[in-house]
Amino acid sequence: MGGYCDRVRVRLAPSPTGPPHVGNAYIGLFDYAFARREGGDFILRIEDTDRERSTRESEEAILEAFRWVGLEWDEGPDVGGPYGPYRQSERFDIYRQYARQLLEAGAAYHCFCTPERLADVRKRRQAQGLPSGYDRLCRQLSEEEVQRKLDAGVRHTVRLKVPLDGETRFEDLVRGAVIIRNSEIDDQVLLKSDGFPTYHLACVVDDHLMEISHVIRAEEWISSTPKHVLLYEAFGWEPPVFIHMPLLRNKDRSKISKRKNPTSLLWYREQGFLPEAMRNFLAMKGWSLGEDREVFGLGDMVENFTWDRVKTSGPVFDLKKLEWLNGEYLRAMTAEELLQRVLQEPYTRRAGERVEKLLAVTRLIRERIKRLCEFDELTNFFFEREPYEAADLIPKKHDADFVRRALREACELLEDSEDWSAEFLEGTLRGLAERQGWKRGALYMALRVAVTCRRVSTPLFETMEVLGKHECLERLQTALHKAAALD
Ligand code: GLU
């Protein structure tokens, strides 16, 4: 473990340059679980060093989405803390000061190369089959030359003086030793020509000053870590422990991307995936509670958290699986709980309806709903009569005559009934089919379309009970009118 091992401190460091990303929440769950397990601290840090692409709206959306998915941080831009500020754009003076320190120690240098020259170098090196990095021209400048250019106000960056030979290594807690030859590492820019830090400088300085003990991030950052290790060495600081989590992947095993999977947490929220299903899903992509337990809560993860349960094989982000998991959580709820969730966001425009009716309807769709946003679509016909084609009333292998007779007989039979319970309706209508020698399925299909306006719906008799006698008889009459026009 690193030098700060007396207290576990981890950080999630999103860049607010777009919608909140599922990959960030996934990493955040590991930060959270590990910090809670160890009684440590979980820090949220906003890495907005990219001034052009970072926005406050994105930051706010990210915080809100992380909270929605169940992450709770102890320190961050919104809650404060003793290591603030937690937004990198408010720390620029700090990074400049540390860049100066490296320059003074001879561990970094000024680079005056123009973007045009750098592009040229890149092209030339590529053509020669060399790695596409910088050719280190300015590393050879004499002190006087450097001073003269600085005095003349020539635009410049600050670069890390990467050792020309030897190797850099670090131990990844879940992957073991990672070793890279220094000759393969570019002289990384630390301060850009506008004076702003790059990710690498800001990240290392902050992880050190914020006393981060474990850096948990996605494996796409592995190639940056040797640069960070060199920076720690240049500063004379103890590096943290590094953990690179397997990336979430599309089905074709490429890195999860918008084109192949929705990647914004907002989309999942809008669709009505439950936050508990979402976090269960993300957690199980990189970690397992035990062979046969797929459904588990964040509490279970915290309680049982160890790094050796991290799966290092590339987990595939499988929407079907998430949908299944969401269904598991939805079906475990009572109708009351389910309705409460539907009303919370809200996922329905029916919030003004009578609660008893909403509840009765919810009971009927409980088994079928996969995402909360389906509520209105699944239940619309309970609240309004939908248009349908008269021909829909005709069951397979039957004709218009059958529909007219079936609906008329059903109406007559039900008109005077006091009882309108599902059991009564079922018994009565089954009796009708038997007496007439009709196929039960055919009668029910005609009735289903008449009453629900759809060929696929919630269970017929329960649905009729919820709709009530008056509404059902009116719909049957409407259907009879429609059927009168059929040949
Ligand atoms: N800002 C980086 C990101 O957006 C953080 C990488 C890291 O955790 O060091 O993922």
Image (cartoon, helix red, strand yellow):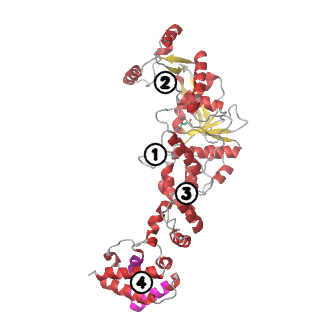
Frontmost of labels 1 and 4 is 4
Give neighbour class at mark 2: few <14, some 14-19, many 20+ (Cα, 10 Å): few
Give the percent coordinates (x, y) of residue 399: 30, 82
Residue 450 lies in the magenta stretch = yes
Q: Which one is in front, 277 or 309?
A: 277
Q: Earlier in the sequence, mark 2 or mark 3?
A: 2
Give the spatial CA distance, label 2 vs label 1. 38 Å
Q: Are marks 1 and 4 in contact (CB under 8 Å)?
A: no
Give the percent coordinates (x, y) of residue 439: 39, 84
Give the spatial CA distance, label 3 vs label 1. 26 Å
- Amino acid beneath label 4: Arg
Give the percent coordinates (x, y) of residue 379: 46, 69
Q: Which one is in front, 315 or 36?
A: 36
Quadrant, the C terminus? bottom left
Residue that badge 2 annotates: 194
Q: Earlier in the sequence, mark 2 or mark 1?
A: 2
Residue 302 lies in the magenta stretch = no
Give neighbour class at mark 3: few <14, some 14-19, many 20+ (Cα, 10 Å): many
Residue that badge 3 annotates: 274
Residue that badge 1 annotates: 253
Image point 52% across, 10% down: which residue?
Answer: 147
* Direction front: furthest residue: 352
